[in-house]
Image (cartoon, rainbow, N blue to C red):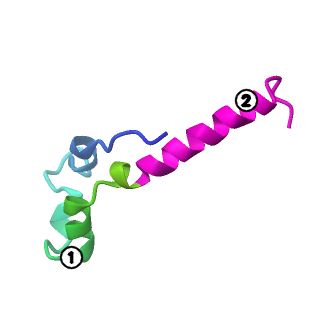
Amino acid sequence: MLEPLDRCRRDSTLFQFTTKQLRDFIDPNHLLIHIDEQLDFAKLVAPLETISKQEGAEREETNPVGLR
């Protein structure tokens, strides 16, 4: 299961004695910045997590002991 992105921690300062953040070193118009701002990765993979949970439940039903 994916955990929510901790943007506050991720965007905090890089080093203890500086105010520089990672984004200070990346061009604001860079494609990755736009993707980060507009794409919600958790929504993108939510259907995959649902499928994975269903498959796990089906495996438990057919093999309740946990044998492979």
> In this picture, is 65 found above or below 33?
above
For image coordinates 44% across by 42% down, the residue present is: 2
Using the rendered view, name the quadrant where residue 62 is placed.
Answer: top right
> In this picture, is 27 found above or below 1?
below
Residue that badge 2 annotates: 60
Question: Observer-nearest residue: 60 or 8?
Answer: 60
On screen, residue 60 versus residue 63, left or right, reads: left
> In this picture, is 5 found above or below 61?
below
Instruction: Please check the rendered image and state whether residue 58 is part of the magenta-colored stretch, yes or no.
Output: yes
- Residue 6, given in percent of the width and then of the height, sits at 29, 41
Q: Bounds of the magenta span? A: 45-68
Question: Observer-nearest residue: 23 or 68?
Answer: 68
Residue that badge 1 annotates: 30
Question: Observer-nearest residue: 31 or 9?
Answer: 31
The majority secondary structure of the magenta stretch comes to helix
> In this picture, is 33 found above or below 51?
below
Please tell me whether mark 1 sits on a helix, a strand or a loop.
Answer: loop
On screen, residue 64 versus residue 36, left or right, reads: right
